[in-house]
């Protein structure tokens, strides 16, 4: 068995587990090592000093596997170079298949390739195990003198919220979305979740700050809901984490919503759950009657409902009330600064509020799909995940294929209909079109048309990989004629562009990478299929947009007919 994938995906952990089942330990070197009778391990093929040493180790592993078992861990590039050096085209073909579908088996020599990049921490069962490992109650019962009951231990407050099934599912949605842009290695997922709970705090420092300052020592800048998207980390750290870059691209907190933002300014008429999140004292006052408590903190329960301002820490409810009704211009200005700009590099108050509502205010807004549509830049993420699971389960997707064809037709030609099937434009017109650009589409020549019954949807992770890895279907492939060379992989960003094009019939402005994928897909189709007979033009400027048959004049020796 050969495991290939990025650093941090668990290859070494599998090798350790393999050795443990044999009552031995993982070798300290990277050479091919016999860990038990006829049981061999290469801990890291890329750790060997040169290509010749890697080829020798791989060749030996293949030989040993004829009479025993061998486990080889290797990064993709090193593995490919090694197999090329051994002149093993069959193994290379099997490796390519594993990279596309997650796993493949080669008969002679008997080798199973597993692309561990296809493992998803968000898979059913695996996701719950990760959360239990990090947030189980016995880990967070508090130390001696813990100020949690006074609302001043952000670590325990964060862990408590992350045990909520609703919050866990929202975190899962964000990670699924980010997985479209980056390989979610287990190492990175654990690091981000740990940062979300603990940040830079220690128990000793937390107790000292509470002793010196009181509950005001901790505010929403220490909350899990902002740290999950990189809150509190410097820019150079954020840029080094592909998964954090993907999480931040969701735009959580940056997308405005009239109703949700209105609840921050005045939570009085909001649903009870929302008023509780805002720290409205009528819903969740922590102080007992007669306690001497600052009005600004009258409804606070934890750091998660407090915002830092120049007027001191206050609940979301108190901030909104100060901005909306206070007659002191200085207090209003300070409130607006905290609401819109934030303090000391903290996120703005309205950003923190939207983030909290996304995770904890799901039910009053209509459920996970509705809250994702209203508070994320990717409005169709939940729909893509549901579609991927439907495809994996073999459910009917005819209507979805039609809708996708409509969106793709608009992206590449400006023609917003699926009645003519999938339109393949002339490659020159496609490159001039710049799919998704913020400019009106011009008429383009039609190379060919593909009827909808030739299109199908599939998922990348099929067959053997589902038995070997924890997979989570979060993307789909649009395939022409069931030919694996004629497919378009649709991840969250691409799906967003297709849905917006179909729904709004306007420019979508999605990423360069996605538009390059579109060009490559249509370029492959145009180079494979013969042009349709006759000359047709997709004219998006017609009312309604239509495909126009162009009849050219026919010249004879006697003149024009």
Image: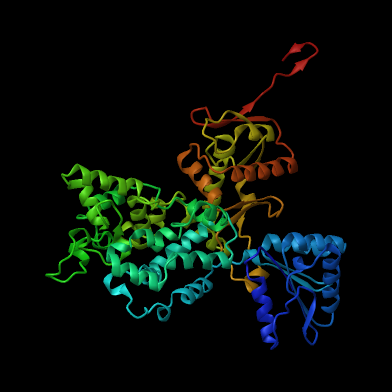
Residue at 53% across / 65% down in the picture? Answer: 189
Quadrant of the image for the N terminus? bottom right
Image location (x, y in percent) of residue 368? 40, 60
Can residue 164 be seen by looking at this rendering?
A: no
Q: Quadrant of residue 179?
A: bottom right
Q: Residue furthest left?
A: 290
471 displayed left or right of 284: right
Nearer-the-camera pick, 187 or 173: 187
Nearer-the-camera pick, 176 or 402: 176
Picture layout, residue 178 above or below residue 21? above
Nearer-the-camera pick, 4 or 479: 4
Q: Quadrant of residue 457?
A: bottom right
Image location (x, y in percent) of residue 391? 56, 61
Q: Residue furthest top?
A: 558
Quadrant of the image for the C terminus? top right
Picture layout, residue 142 above or below residue 376? below
426 displayed left or right of 312: right
Nearer-the-camera pick, 552 or 150: 150
- How is the structure coloured here? rainbow
Image location (x, y in percent) of residue 230? 47, 57
Image location (x, y in percent) of residue 193? 48, 66
Can residue 87 be seen by looking at this rendering?
A: yes
Q: How many circles with numbers are drawn on the protein?
A: 0
Picture layout, residue 511 above or below residue 131? above
Residue at 74% across / 41% down in the picture? Answer: 527
């Amino acid at each position: 068995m050969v495991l290939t994938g990025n650093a941090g995906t668990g290859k070494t952990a599998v090798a350790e587990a393999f050795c443990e089942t044999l009552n031995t330990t993982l070798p300290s070197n990277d050479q091919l090592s016999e860990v038990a009778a006829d049981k061999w391990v290469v801990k890291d093929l890329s750790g060997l000093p040169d290509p010749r040493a890697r080829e020798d180790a791989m060749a030996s592993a293949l030989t040993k596997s004829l009479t025993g078992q061998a486990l080889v861990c290797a990064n993709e590039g090193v593995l490919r170079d090694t197999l090329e050096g051994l002149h093993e085209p069959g193994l290379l073909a099997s490796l390519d298949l594993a990279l596309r579908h997650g796993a493949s088996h080669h008969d002679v020599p008997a080798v199973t390739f597993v692309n561990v990049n296809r493992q998803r921490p968000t898979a059913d069962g695996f996701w719950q195990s990760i959360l239990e490992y990090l947030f189980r109650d016995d880990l967070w019962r508090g130390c001696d003198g813990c100020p949690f009951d006074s609302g001043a231990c952000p670590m325990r407050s964060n862990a408590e919220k992350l045990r909520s099934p609703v919050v866990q599912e929202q975190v899962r949605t964000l990670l699924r979305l980010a997985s479209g842009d980056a390989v979610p290695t287990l190492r990175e997922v654990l690091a981000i979740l740990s940062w979300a709970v603990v940040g830079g705090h220690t128990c000793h420092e937390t107790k000292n700050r509470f002793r010196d300052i009181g509950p005001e020592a901790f505010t929403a800048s220490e909350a899990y809901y902002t740290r999950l998207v990189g809150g509190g980390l410097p820019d150079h750290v954020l840029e080094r984490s592909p998964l954090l870059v993907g999480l931040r691209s969701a735009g959580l907190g940056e997308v405005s919503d009239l109703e949700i933002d209105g609840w921050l300014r005045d939570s009085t008429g909001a649903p009870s759950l929302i008023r509780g999140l805002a720290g409205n004292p009528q819903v969740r006052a922590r102080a007992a009657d007669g306690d001497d408590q600052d009005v600004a903190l009258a409804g606070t329960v934890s750091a998660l409902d407090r915002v830092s301002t120049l007027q001191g820490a206050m609940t979301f409810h108190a901030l909104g009330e100060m901005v909306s009704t206070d007659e002191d211009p200085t207090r209003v200005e300070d409130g607006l600064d905290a609401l819109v700009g934030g303090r000391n590099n903290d996120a703005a108050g309205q950003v923190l509020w939207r983030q909290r509502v996304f995770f904890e205010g799901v039910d009053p807004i209509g459920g996970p799909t509705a809250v994702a549509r209203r508070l994320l830049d990717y409005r169709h993420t939940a729909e893509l995940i549901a579609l991927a699971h439907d495809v994996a389960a073999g459910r009917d997707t005819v209507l979805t294929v039609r809708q996708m064809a409509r969106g793709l037709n608009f992206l590449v030609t400006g023609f917003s209909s699926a009645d003519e099937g999938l339109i393949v434009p002339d490659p020159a017109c496609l490159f001039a079109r710049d799919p998704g650009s913020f400019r009106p589409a011009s008429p383009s020549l039609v190379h060919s048309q593909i009827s909808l019954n030739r299109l199908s949807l599939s998922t990348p992770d099929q067959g053997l990989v589902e038995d070997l890895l924890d997979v989570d279907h979060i993307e789909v492939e649009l395939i022409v004629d069931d030919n694996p060379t004629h497919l378009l992989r649709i991840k969250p960003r691409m799906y967003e562009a297709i849905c917006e094009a179909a729904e709004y019939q306007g420019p979508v402005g999605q990423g360069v990478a996605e538009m390059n994928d579109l060009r490559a897909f249509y370029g492959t189709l145009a180079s494979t299929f013969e042009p349709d007979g006759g000359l047709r033009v997709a004219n998006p400027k017609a009312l309604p947009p239509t495909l126009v048959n162009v009849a050219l004049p026919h010249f004879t020796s006697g003149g024009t007919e």
